[in-house]
Amino acid sequence: MRVRSGERMIDKLESIEDTKGNSGDRGRLVITNLRLIWHSLTMPRVSLSVGFNCIINITTKTVNSKLRGLTEALYILTKANNTRFEFIFTNLIPGTPRLFTSVNGVYKAYTSSKMYRELKLRGAIIQNKQLRILPQEQIFSRVNGVWNLSSDQGNLGTFIITNVRLVWFANMNELFNISLPYLQIASVKVRESKFGMALVVESSEASGGYVLGFRIDPVEKLHEVHKEISALYSVYSQCPVFGVEFVLQDKFLLDLGGYNMNTIPRAFLLVSAGQPNIDDEQLELPMEDETEIDESVNDTADVLAAYLADGHHHDREPVFSPELGLAIEKLKEGYTLQTLWEVLPS
């Protein structure tokens, strides 16, 4: 399976069932620093990927599994494109809380490290004119005398350039600041403005599509700063720092080598933001054989229908179905009876 630059595998659990979409099918759950990946063991191309950024809530739920019967499972509620989906994962090996501890731990680490990935305006990031440094963050330069051109008169402040973000704050008011991670930068240019030559930084559409202008005198210094930011942005693009790091401590397993990790509950699992990576040798995701996929068939909506979570369900008007010969509830737009039957597990 392919992962993006900067993505690392944190944990891998065998014998996990996707109870809602693929009930009765034994699979593998891979937990990375960005998402959950489940795939069937019998047919690896049957898979799903759930990004942590889409998750609304993680809890437990009693479900009826084809392989384990009534059991407690991991319930994940997500939202994407204004549509809610729910995923239920069941550990087929009884007596181990590892599924719950690993997923919850990594998700908490992800949510607590948003400063690495999200644009922040007027945040508590400066104290006594010093940047509150994040774990894994290094300051490369500090540039004084930087004018923020967001208003007609401009605001004099200071640039702090690090390996993960660009920070500016006003000298007269530390709370007037911006923290822009390289992950959310769309472009960095030097161009003419009504204030003269200025450094123009555009943020991504996902972060609001802001256009930020800064003036630095003299012009030679402006070009030096532009060159430094561009170089750091290029390096970051090749190897992003997402801020979700982990430490796994298995006291029992160190003395019990050779046992199946799923059969022994973890003595201690610590997942936190900003901890050093200590398990680089086991970060590659399992590869699968190449198969030819017919991309002309768009069945994404049909597959996602199995995971729809309509928390505010209202009965739709009844309509006559010629296929069934009786009245049925009107189907949602984009769905047919045939596609709904196809998503039911056989």
Image (cartoon, helix red, strand yellow):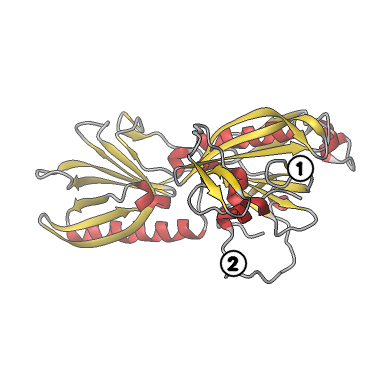
Quarter of the image where the N terminus is located: bottom right
Amino acid found under the numbered disc labelled 2:
Val
Residue under the point 78% across and 48% down? 25
Residue under the point 59% across and 59% down? 299
Residue under the point 31% across and 28% down? 128
Coordinates of residue 115 in the picture (x, y in percent): 43, 39
Q: Is residue 219 above or below residue 68?
A: below
Asked whether residue 183 is in view, the answer is yes
Coordinates of residue 188 in the picture (x, y in percent): 31, 59
Decide: few, some or many residues near mark 2? Use Cα within 10 Å; few <14, some 14-19, many ≥20.
few
> Which one is nearer the viewer's eye here, 75 or 321?
321
Q: Nearer the viewer, mark 1 or mark 2?
A: 2
- Name the residue tied to disc 2: 297
- Name the residue tied to disc 1: 16
Q: Is residue 31 above or below residue 255?
A: below
Query: Looking at the image, how many numbered discs can be counted on the residues?
Result: 2
* SS label for mark 2: loop
Residue under the point 49% across and 39% down? 316
Decide: few, some or many residues near mark 1? Use Cα within 10 Å; few <14, some 14-19, many ≥20.
many
Amino acid found under the numbered disc labelled 1:
Ile
Q: Is residue 223 left or right of residue 313?
A: left
Coordinates of residue 38 in the picture (x, y in percent): 69, 48
Residue 104 is drawn in which quadrant? top right
C-alpha gap between disc 1 and disc 2: 28 Å
Residue 52 is drawn in which quadrant? top right
The disc label shown at residue 85, or none: none
> Which one is nearer the viewer's eye here, 243 or 339?
339
